[in-house]
Image (cartoon, helix red, strand yellow):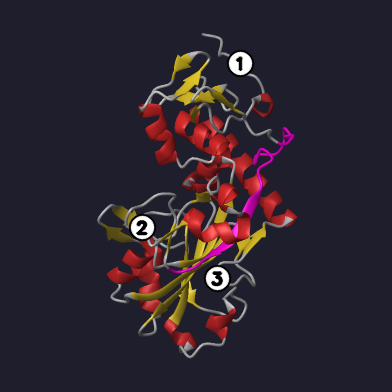
Amino acid sequence: MQTPRVRGPLHKRTLQLTDLIRVNVLIAERSGLSRRGADTAIANSRVTTGGRTVALGERLDALAPLELDGKELTAKPRPPVDSEDALVGAEVFAWYKPVGVTTTHADPYATVTLPQALSPALGAERAARVLSIGRLDRESEGLLLLTEERRVVSPLAHPRAGLRRAYAVATKAMVGESEFQRLRAGIRLTDGWAHAIEARGVQRNDDLPADVRSGDMDPGQWSFISIGEGRHHEVRRLYGAISHPVLRLIRVGYGPVRLGGLSPGELRPITDSERQELVRVLAAAAMSKIRSTSPTSA
């Protein structure tokens, strides 16, 4: 009988959240240019690394040397990273995204982009470096996680992390229990099946913004839904499928992070307990990925 190969203990493997980074991202982080501006500079052969001209779409190490028009672009020093910290030392903010903001850095059709909305709180230079973890469409509002550390964006946004997105939803008429059951059971949308992890009427202890609690709308017109991924307009399409078009959509939770007492446009660092839970969830998701891709012995 063939002797099975023995693999080292899983806990000794280094968890890699990313490898190389697109050069336009590095230029944007170091120079203050937008990523589109960085692409223009690359296309015009103005960017070099190690004495050679870089190419559009090229990926480099985060600390790779870069020059723009012959001037060195200095890499930002990274904070010390605890080997057990799955957030790799990243600073993460909770932000109440107002209606009307497009969560992108550059969009010719956007009235207000993410950097424009964040500039009053963070300053234009820092706001240009901030990335959203997932997105909210322009007409939706509520909790959006932000960071300057792109290595944690995809892991926190990926469904594998199991971070629930929780929403308060306003509709014209009250949603009944049979319709909540349909949402929980699953509905076929144009891009596949989707279902709610939780769907119900709002409760007293739900984390709703102050203007919702004190507003004129009947509490019965508000409902609560949580989902495990962030597909395009997923909540709006689910409610459309049960004939309850969404009038207002507010994200009130993302994993352990809650909207709390934030008002539209307000920003706060996540708390220590929120951070610890995100670290735990990310570490568990990374370990699960390692186990799922490890070869099995016969």
x and y percent of residue 227 in the render? 46, 60
Residue drawn at (53%, 44%) of the image? 153
Looking at the image, do the residues carrying marks 1 and 2 touch, with CB atoms under 8 Å apart?
Answer: no
Q: Give the residue at mark 2.
A: 194
Magenta stretch: includes residue 272: no
Residue drawn at (39%, 68%) of the image? 139
Q: Foreground mark, 2 or 3? A: 3
Spatial CA distance of label 2 from label 3 is 29 Å
Spatial CA distance of label 1 from label 2 is 40 Å
Q: At numbered mark 2, what does the secondary structure look like: helix, strand or loop?
A: strand
Mark 2 residue type: Ala
Determine which of the numbered discs, if any, sits on residue 6 in the image: 1
Mark 1 residue type: Val
Secondary structure mostly taken by the magenta-highlighted segment of the chain: loop
Image quadrant where residue 122 sits: bottom right
Q: Foreground mark, 1 or 2? A: 2
The numbered mark, 1 or 2, whose residue comes first in the sequence reads 1
Residue drawn at (28%, 69%) of the image? 241
What's drawn in magenta, residue-wise? 79-99
The numbered mark, 2 or 3, whose residue comes first in the sequence reads 2
x and y percent of residue 147 in the render? 59, 48
Looking at the image, do the residues carrying marks 1 and 3 touch, with CB atoms under 8 Å apart?
Answer: no
Residue drawn at (48%, 91%) of the image? 216
x and y percent of residue 25 in the render? 49, 35
Q: Give the residue at mark 3.
A: 264
Pointer 1: residues within 10 angstroms few (<14), some, or many (20+)?
Answer: few
The numbered mark, 1 or 3, whose residue comes first in the sequence reads 1
Image quadrant where residue 247 sits: bottom left
Spatial CA distance of label 1 from label 3 is 54 Å
Q: Please name whichever residue, 178 or 147, is drawn nearer the observer in this view of the structure.
A: 147
x and y percent of residue 165 in the render? 50, 60
